[in-house]
Amino acid sequence: MWRPDKLRFGPAGIPRRAKARSTKRGVMEVKALGLDAMEIEFVRRISLTEASARDVRKVAESLDVALTVHAPYYVNLASPDVEKAKASAERVYRAAVVGSIAGAWSVCFHAAYYMGREPSEVYSLVKSSLKEILKRLQDQGVEIWLRPETTGSLSEFGTLEELLRLSSELEMVLPVVDFAHMHARSGGRINSYEEFSEVLARIEEVLGREALENMHMHVSGIEYGEKGEIRHLNLEESDFNYVDLLKVLRDFGVKGVLICESPSLEDDALLLKNSYERLLKEA
């Protein structure tokens, strides 16, 4: 399995300026832009066949572009409807399988909703479902990180503490740390050098230094209200303090992939990468 060699930057999906709307073309466009990562977005369905996934892998490896996958958005591993919970688990499983074939090292997903239940009950349901998915992947010889994402809405399962606990209790599970979601969920906190440092220090405390060298992260501008996330924004149109975040990532020596989910996709991904490289030179 691929191991992060540095901090890489890329867009969540095919760059907007790519003329051909294929994943393979998207990887090529990412490289041409000077970026070195891309998230394959299975928003509504798993859009790659196993054959096309193999083609994507060849191109990505030849161009040294690291890949991640976002499973379909409709996932609720803790749904009270048993059939919906099973279908959700199947979506995560298939995204992991196809993502692995494409050369992705990590698959992220929004795990569940509380739906008026106690967080502890939802936690147990999510953990049980992930154990089953991991067993299926292991039986098939599929090696890929399962990454539940920190979520931006108060109605969604996915606080940092919930995901750290899952990651400490299950093999091949680590969080996707979405800093914009955490900023929104906290009502505007988690937006300073000190607060970002606390997040990374907590990850290291619970999961060890290895976790900071194997990070899958999301960043964007974000609009939020009393209930958390409302919508993603471009970085310069929001109050998200991306410069301090980049300083913390530099100072903690974080390795992995930072995926930009701003509407502008590649423009903000380049803003992040160029800003980070300037900070490295200043250090």
Image (cartoon, grey):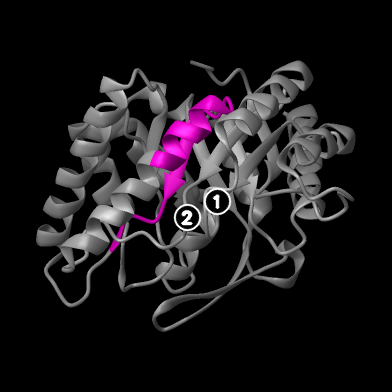
Residue drawn at (11%, 68%) of the image: 118
- Identify residue for label 1: 42
User: Horizontal and vertical percent for residue 235?
Assistant: 71, 62
Query: CA gap, disc 2 to disc 1?
Result: 5 Å
Residue drawn at (61%, 29%) of the image: 51
Front residue of 30/135: it is 135
Numbered disc total:
2
279 on left or right of 223: right
User: Horizontal and vertical percent for residue 175?
Assistant: 38, 42
Q: Quadrant of residue 282?
A: top right
Q: Amino acid at mark 2?
A: Pro
User: Horizontal and vertical percent for residue 267?
Assistant: 82, 53
- Identify residue for label 2: 72
Front residue of 88/104: it is 88
Q: Amino acid at mark 1?
A: Phe
What label sits on residue 179 in the rendered view? none
User: Horizontal and vertical percent for residue 226?
Assistant: 41, 84
Residue drawn at (61%, 17%) of the image: 5
Q: Quadrant of residue 223?
A: bottom right
Above or below: residue 124 compared with residue 281? below
Above or below: residue 168 compared with residue 143? below
Q: Extreme bottom residue here? A: 226
Secondary structure under the numbered disc 1 in the rendered image: loop
| Stretch of the chain drawn in magenta | 94-112
